[in-house]
Amino acid sequence: MDNRIIVNADCGKQKISKHIYGHFAEHLGRCIYEGIWVGEDSPISNTRGIRNDVVKALKKLKMPNLRWPGGCFADTYHWKDGIGDRRKRPSIVNIHWGSTTENNHFGTHEFYDLCQMLDTEPYICGNVGSGTVQEMAEWLEYLTMPGKSPMSDLRRKNGREEPWPLTYWGVGNENWGCGGNMRPQYYADEFRRYATYCRNFSGKKLYKVACGHTEEWNEILMREAHRFMDGLSVHYYTVPGPWQKKGSATEFSAEDWFITLKRAGEIEDFIKRTEAIMDRHDPKKRIGIIMDEWGTWFDVEPGTNPGFLYQQNTMRDALVAGLSFNIFNAHAERMHMANIAQTINVLQAMILTEGAKILLTPTYHVFEMYRVHQDATLLPSHAEVATYEMNNEKIPQVSASASKAGDGTINLSLCNLHHEKEAELSCDIRGAKISGIKGRILAAGSMNALNTFEKPNAVKPSGFDDFKINRDKITVKLPARSVAVLEIK
Ligand code: AHR
């Protein structure tokens, strides 16, 4: 058999942080406005202005966290514009994304209302690019100060007595680019200055995230500021073509399919290179990688605003998601968090909306199937798999990851990346006594299979039983272009 996966079921110490399965929702295009926030007077069913259908769908994903308000938007956002009586909030122009005017109706209180509805942790990105140290310090005071202070009094005046929970805090976003075009030495100093005033008002330690970038940038930042940070933010987008012509999200060839998955898999080299730099300055591995933007980036859907980054989502995106998660799990020691870009209506989204209509994308289904890995113990695995070749380039045909849940269940996630060939695998689950397996699979008849508002259920998971058990060995037949999860008891 060409493909062999060995899982050491009685070993494993490393927990896979649930935060690897995190999200990102920016004030960009139709993500926040329309996708999440429709306002209390909308005919679309909502609770205090937030869409009920979207909340219901996202709750199924067990979302561990939500990053907000950006992205590039974060470094233009002045939080005081988004509090108090909505009718009196000033409008702003979203300079990075389509130069649209926003009314600021979705601000701090509405964001926390959303987090509470989703039972998810906030991860807020503060403004370094165009803000001030005082503005950031005051936002933290507003959010987390339990006692009496100017900002906690303002929060109470706006209807919130208790401080909100907050752990994850980003000190700027892409400060090498949209967040101020800084140089690494300068940002390292700015990070140290801002971080000094990010106080732990609640008594609970904030997890401060510094903005990373290239190897050169990360080297300087880690050297100069590692003592002040808990996480290093890095971004990795899967873009199959040159930036000016990334390619269609839905109309693509087998070559495009292959190159997209090759690029997606290269995230592992990027993680390894980042880890090597971190290991030099933080050998005890205290600081985590925060991959707070990742996913596919294709040309926008024809006829849509180029500044809105609205793209459809196919089986190709599902395979990118499954492959990326298998890689993130394998690096769980350093990977403290990852946030897909973005949750709704932007880039590799879980949900697309059109007025009152909603659809769940193939990527949504992978997030739902992979929930089982959240906070589970990573099982050391080894894969010897066939090569998938095209135009003299090669990638492994199969990707796998295994973890053990608190109740002893072993979950094995498998991706067959090949666009047309099935994969027969033999999986040795060493050290386990298998009594039964339940399988689920996401597969479709074509590479670019997708869900549309007319046919929202064309791609969805189904039961999977194309496997045989022989003591601690399982042989599995994975169809081409598929993502499967086996729940092994
Ligand atoms: O996710 C879209 C944009 O990509 C973000 O605003 C920015 O941080 C990145 O360049």
Image: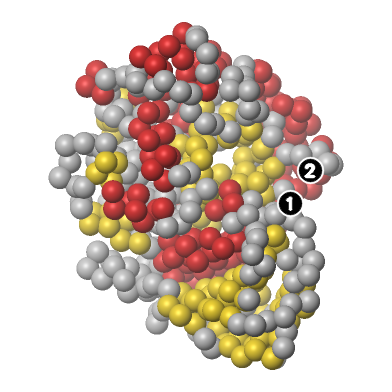
User: Residue 201, located in which quarter of the rendered image?
Assistant: top right
Frontmost residue, 332 versus 167: 167
Q: Is residue 238 above or below residue 196?
A: below
Q: Quadrant of the C terminus?
A: bottom right
Hey, what amino acid is under mark 1? Glu
Frontmost residue, 53 versus 130: 53
Q: Would residue 373 be found to the left or right of residue 450 on screen? A: right
Question: Residue under circle 1?
Answer: 333
Question: Residue under circle 2?
Answer: 285
Residue sitting at 46 percent across and 74 percent down? 442
User: Dot 2 surroundings within 10 Å: few (below 14), some, or many (20 or more)?
Assistant: few
User: Dot 1 surroundings within 10 Å: few (below 14), some, or many (20 or more)?
Assistant: many
Frontmost residue, 300 versus 228: 228
Q: Position of residue 447 (x, y in %)?
A: 43, 76
Residue 164 shows up from this direction: yes
Q: Is residue 461 above or below residue 60?
A: below
Q: Is residue 268 above or below residue 91?
A: below
Hey, what amino acid is under mark 2? Lys
Task: Give the CA separation, mark 2 to mark 1.
Answer: 8 Å
Residue sitting at 32 percent across and 38 percent down? 98
- Local SS, label 1: loop
Q: Would residue 121 be found to the left or right of residue 45 on screen? A: right
Q: Position of residue 427 (x, y in %)?
A: 69, 82
Q: Position of residue 228 (x, y in %)?
A: 72, 26
User: Residue 186, located in which quarter of the rendered image?
Assistant: top right
Asked if marks 2 and 1 touch (Cβ < 8 Å), the reply is: yes
Q: Position of residue 454 (x, y in %)?
A: 22, 68
Q: Mark 1 or mark 2, which is nearer the start of the sequence?
A: 2
